Amino acid sequence: MNLNQKTSPLKNTLFIAFTILGVFNNWSNNLFAQCQEPPKGWFVIICLNHTEASQVRFEIGVGGDQNTHRAWTTWTKGQPTVLSVPIEFRYAKEIWLKAYAIPEKDVSLCICFNDHVTQKMTFDEDEEHETNRDDDNECECGIPR
């Protein structure tokens, strides 16, 4: 018996073991990605099942202070649906948010602070709101847990 025949069962066993580990690794990464905790401070959730627009453009600022309002980001379908606000607004007592549907089609999103929804926004052109951390609202897409 030559050396290759002796190591062949070992190679096969290692191949199977690494294949199983690779499958498990992919499965566990996907499972843990779905179980992530919500961001801390302010964040926005795009309700994908209720949004027809392919993009949503955002402006943000501190509530009650128009001098802080500025362009923030543009979300595009296929990107993550949970958006943490910029660090300088993350723990503000109140934020102002304006969102634009691109193209002008239905959009549903929720503004959240820590573990609760403070404002639901449903629109087909643009909409803006000021919301306080203590506000409480419901959202059809829910907060990731």
Image (cartoon, rainbow, N blue to C red):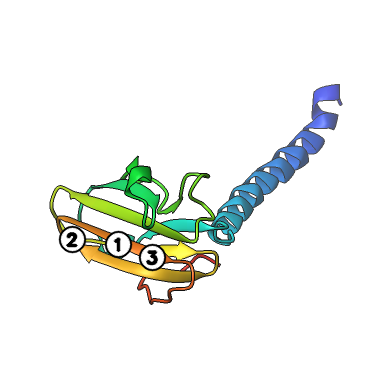
* Element type where label 3 sits in the image: strand
* Element type where label 2 sits in the image: loop
Q: Is residue 145 left or right of residue 75?
A: right
Residue at the image position 34 percent from the left and 44 percent from the top: 67
To which quarter of the image does residue 33 belong? bottom right
> What residue sits right under mark 1 in the picture?
129
Q: How many marks?
A: 3
Label 3 sits on what residue type?
Thr
Q: Are marks 1 and 2 in contact (CB under 8 Å)?
A: no
Q: Are marks 3 and 2 in contact (CB under 8 Å)?
A: no
Residue at the image position 26 percent from the left and 52 percent from the top: 99
Rounded to the nearest angstrom, the CA distance separating label 1 from label 2 is 17 Å
Q: Nearer the viewer, residue 37 or 128?
A: 128
Label 2 sits on what residue type?
Asp
- How far across and how far down the image is residue 1, in percent? 86, 26
Q: Are marks 1 and 3 in contact (CB under 8 Å)?
A: yes
Instruction: Name the mark nearer the viewer: 3 or 2.
Output: 3
Instruction: Name the mark nearer the viewer: 1 or 2.
Output: 1
Rounded to the nearest angstrom, the CA distance separating label 3 from label 2 is 21 Å
Q: Which label's residue is closer to the chain start, 1 or 2?
A: 2
Dot 3, how many residues are within 10 Å of its Cα: few (below 14), some (14-19), or many (20+)? many
Dot 1, how many residues are within 10 Å of its Cα: few (below 14), some (14-19), or many (20+)? some
Rounded to the nearest angstrom, the CA distance separating label 1 from label 3 is 6 Å
* Element type where label 1 sits in the image: strand
> What residue sits right under mark 3 in the picture?
131
Question: Is residue 77 something one can see in this rendering?
Answer: no
Q: Is residue 127 left or right of residue 16?
A: left
> What residue sits right under mark 2 in the picture?
106
Label 1 sits on what residue type?
His
Residue at the image position 36 percent from the left and 57 percent from the top: 64
